[in-house]
Image (spheres, rainbow, N blue to C red):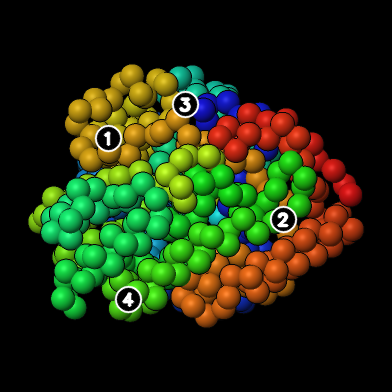
């Protein structure tokens, strides 16, 4: 895979919210507790290391924001806890507001010992390290040859994403594909389409045809809150548009080329082809509506392989297609995401026990079942050779394409007003014109970049040999002006 060795410093999401604006501790505890959907395992446990030397049971509290793998995680933890009487894993799935819940819980001294993390979570590593929240795992990794063999941590050190200098804070074990189109084959065929068209304009027409054929009960498309980033953004990137609006060659923000996509995508709403109210629903609600056959076209990445198999099984045949582009040609890379990793928080009391748990979640046996269950795809060459891809179910439909890669991080800036995804979504909803929105974004983003350069809070990234189809292969320069 192209993401095995990156030549640039990158993050999956460079505009994560600052840790500075947090509430006080009293509200933090209730907020974090209220957001949790607990899936706890209270069985006994132990897994070697210092945690078992005293003979007393140790409980390691783990929080995750992954719901698509709930079946596998809970059954595996149940088995672990039954087999290991001195190390108890207490596992909780947080429903919403993930990053903020972690911050609030840490401030209130109610944080777990370990949290799940993925490059798509938007948790800027330097913020959490400087706040004293994330523990370096480097010393544990150095002493664990089995972990090194299975997870190849030194081949997946992504500066600013999971490592800073020589310190590794989390090790991805899997990779999530870029976005695909999941579609109801029957509804598309009834409207005269054998699959998903290769251009966005044709997809708009297909959505309209499904809606008209549905007679007011079935619609062409279901979106979710701020649906731009779910799959429309991927269409722009594959069409060669600037990733997150950043012109890597010139080191400035320029959203101008996004205008045709915004205006074409707006026709989906203008034609009445979107399930009414879907944009006000959460992701899981819309997944359930898709599984019920309420609309034909949904966009999301490879986690949907597990979602539509276990969480919201479809009683109809559903397909997976590559995203269309503006003209039917792929001119840019689609971002993929290193994922399924674990962070040890500095507040954890028994860090050796925490490492035992992280090692368990990162073990060959555990990962083999995880990948064969279709919950993610293996990141390392070692695990790619160890799991049986034929057992992975629909995850095979999300196999990485040659044009998928990880983009270098754009400068971390502080903008005033709404971010680009919200503004572009408002264009698609018909709330603002494309020209006005693009001018506003170009002005605000470049003003923020200049402010950051002036006060030293960011650097300007320039990649003179930047290749949109191979974004990780360029030579990065970091300028202070």
Q: Residues within 10 Å of mark 3 (few under 14, many from 20)?
A: few
Whole-angstrom CA distance, mark 3 to mark 1, is: 15 Å
- What numbered label is drawn on residue 1? 3
Mark 4 and mark 3 in contact (Cβ < 8 Å)?
no
Q: Which residue is mark 1?
A: 396
Where is residue 146, by image quadrant?
A: top left
Asked if 61 appears above or below 222 in the picture, the reply is: above
Task: Indicate which disc, 4 or 2, sits on the residue closer to the N terminus.
Answer: 2
- What numbered label is drawn on residue 11? none
Q: Which residue is mark 4?
A: 272
* Labels 4, 2: front one: 4
Relative to the observer, which residue lies in front, 26 or 223? 223
* Labels 1, 4: front one: 4
Is residue 109 visible in the rendered image? The answer is no
Q: Secondary structure at mark 3?
A: loop
Task: Indicate which disc, 2 or 1, sits on the residue closer to the N terminus.
Answer: 2
Whole-angstrom CA distance, mark 3 to mark 4, is: 40 Å
Q: Which residue is mark 2?
A: 253
Residue located at (16% from left, 69% from top): 213
Residue located at (68% from left, 31% from top): 474
């Amino acid at each position: 895979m192209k993401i095995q060795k990156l030549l640039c410093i990158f993050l999956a999401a460079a505009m994560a919210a600052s840790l500075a604006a947090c509430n006080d501790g009293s509200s933090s505890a209730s907020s974090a507790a209220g957001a949790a959907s607990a899936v706890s395992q209270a069985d006994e446990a132990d897994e070697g290391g210092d945690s078992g030397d005293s003979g007393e049971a140790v409980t390691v509290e783990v929080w995750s924001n992954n719901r698509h793998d709930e079946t596998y995680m809970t059954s595996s933890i149940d088995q672990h806890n039954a087999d290991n009487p001195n190390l108890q894993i207490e596992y909780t799935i947080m429903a919403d507001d993930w990053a903020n819940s972690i911050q609030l819980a840490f401030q209130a001294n109610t944080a777990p010992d370990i949290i799940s993390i993925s490059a798509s979570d938007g948790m800027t590593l330097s913020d959490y390290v400087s706040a004293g929240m994330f523990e370096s795992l480097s010393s544990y990794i150095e002493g664990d040859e089995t972990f090194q063999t299975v997870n190849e941590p030194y081949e997946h050190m992504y500066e600013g994403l999971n490592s800073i200098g020589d310190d590794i804070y989390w090790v991805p074990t899997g990779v999530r594909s870029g976005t695909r189109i999941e579609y109801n084959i029957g509804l598309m065929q009834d409207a005269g389409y054998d699959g998903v068209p290769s251009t966005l304009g044709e997809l708009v027409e297909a959505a309209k045809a499904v809606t008209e054929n549905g007679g007011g009960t079935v619609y062409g498309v279901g979106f979710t809150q701020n649906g731009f980033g779910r799959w429309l953004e991927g269409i722009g990137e594959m069409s060669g548009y600037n990733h997150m609006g950043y012109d890597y060659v010139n080191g400035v923000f320029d959203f101008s080329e996004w205008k045709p996509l915004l205006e074409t995508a707006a026709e989906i709403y203008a034609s009445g082809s979107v399930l009414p109210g879907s944009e006000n629903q959460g992701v899981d609600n819309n997944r359930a509506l898709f599984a019920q056959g309420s609309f034909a076209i949904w966009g999301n990445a490879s986690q949907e392989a597990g979602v539509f198999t276990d969480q919201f099984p479809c009683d109809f045949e559903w397909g997976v297609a590559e995203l269309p582009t503006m003209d039917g040609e792929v001119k840019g890379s689609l971002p993929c995401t290193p994922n399924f990793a674990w962070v040890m928080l500095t507040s954890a009391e028994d860090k050796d026990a925490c490492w035992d748990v992280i090692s368990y979640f990162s073990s060959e046996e555990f990962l083999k079942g995880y990948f064969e269950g279709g919950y993610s795809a293996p990141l390392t060459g070692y695990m790619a050779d160890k799991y049986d891809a034929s057992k992975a179910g629909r995850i095979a439909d999300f196999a990485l394409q040659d044009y998928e890669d990880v983009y270098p991080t754009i400068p971390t800036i502080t903008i005033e007003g709404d971010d680009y995804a919200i503004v572009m979504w408002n264009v698609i909803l018909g709330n603002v014109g494309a020209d006005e929105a693009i001018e506003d974004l170009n002005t605000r983003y470049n003003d923020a970049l200049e402010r950051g350069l002036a006060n030293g809070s960011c650097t300007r990234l320039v990649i003179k040999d930047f290749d949109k189809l191979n974004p990780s292969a360029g030579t990065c320069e970091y300028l202070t002006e």
